[in-house]
Amino acid sequence: MADYYARRVASYERIYLKPERQADLREIEAWLPAPFAGRRVLEIACGTGWWTPHGAARAAHWRATDLNPQTLAAAQSKPLPADVVQFQTVDAYRLTELGSETFDAAFAGCWWSHVPLDRLPGWLDLLHARLAPGAIVVMLDNRYVPGSSTPISRADDAGNTYQQRALDDGSTHEVLKNFPTPAQAFAALGPRARDPQWIDFDHYWVLQYRLA
């Protein structure tokens, strides 16, 4: 997965240029600043930073993290307020690079879908351990839309689904990409999530909750 996204940096944001997704994107970009207003936010797997300027617009502090230096470099090239946004190389499955630091909000855009189902509960525990009680969490990801989404190529015995993706360099990569239902997402969160809200757009979904 890390190799795939490192190779995809130059073409990464083409997905956000699809005409049928523009209305969703403008609506989400306008909605995103409000949950994080005045908060210290940990962004997981920021990639090239498409969502970072929007989420950080009213935040007190925004820590944009990613494993790949290539994608982080692309994110850092965007016009962002240096007094609010800080970038850091962090492994999302460990978070040890953060030391003992904690936050009162978290955001992950198009990350949930790449977490294997058997690792999702443990990863959520790891993330929540970095957050203060009452923290706001927002997850954003893709819905599966025939004709716009890359077709699913297979499913494994655990219920994970996969896509075959071709890059400009001619390489083909099998990428884990899950498409949860609201019920599946709420079940994964369990009682730790207070007032969970699921918002369906045509091509995306947003999950917001408050940590118990």
Image (spheres, helix red, strand yellow):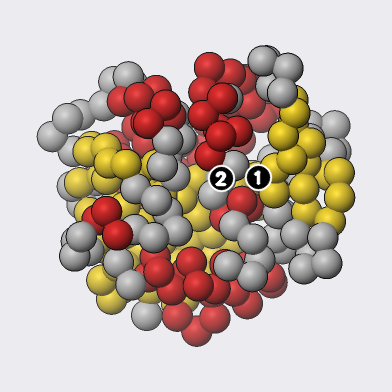
Specify the amino acid type for callout 2. Cys
* Distance from Cα at disc 2 to Cα at disc 1: 7 Å
Residue found farthest to the bottom: 191
Place of residue 31 in the rendered image (x, y in percent of width and height, measured from the top left) = 45, 43
Relative height, residue 93 to residue 71 (above, below)? below
Residue 178 placement, left or right of 198: right
Place of residue 64 in the rendered image (x, y in percent of width and height, measured from the top left) = 32, 42
Within 10 Å of disc 2 (Cα), the crowding (few <14, some 14-19, many 20+) is some
- Give the mark count: 2
Residue 129 or residue 199, whichever sits in front? 129
Looking at the image, which residue is at 86% across and 50% down? 154
Q: Kindly identify which numbered label has been placed on residue 142.
A: 1
Q: Quadrant of residue 185?
A: bottom right
Specify the amino acid type for callout 1. Asn
Relative height, residue 23 to residue 177 (above, below)? above
Place of residue 148 in the rendered image (x, y in percent of width and height, measured from the top left) = 78, 31
Looking at the image, which residue is at 37% across and 36% down? 52
Looking at the image, which residue is at 40% across and 69% down? 126
Tell me which label, 2 or 1, sits earlier in the chain.
2
Residue 88 placement, left or right of 169: left
**Which quarter of the rendered picture does the C terminus lie within?**
bottom left
Residue 89 or residue 77, whichever sits in front? 89
Which residue is the site of mark 2?
110
Residue 26 placement, left or right of 66: right
Q: Quadrant of residue 170?
A: top right
Secondary structure found at label 1: strand
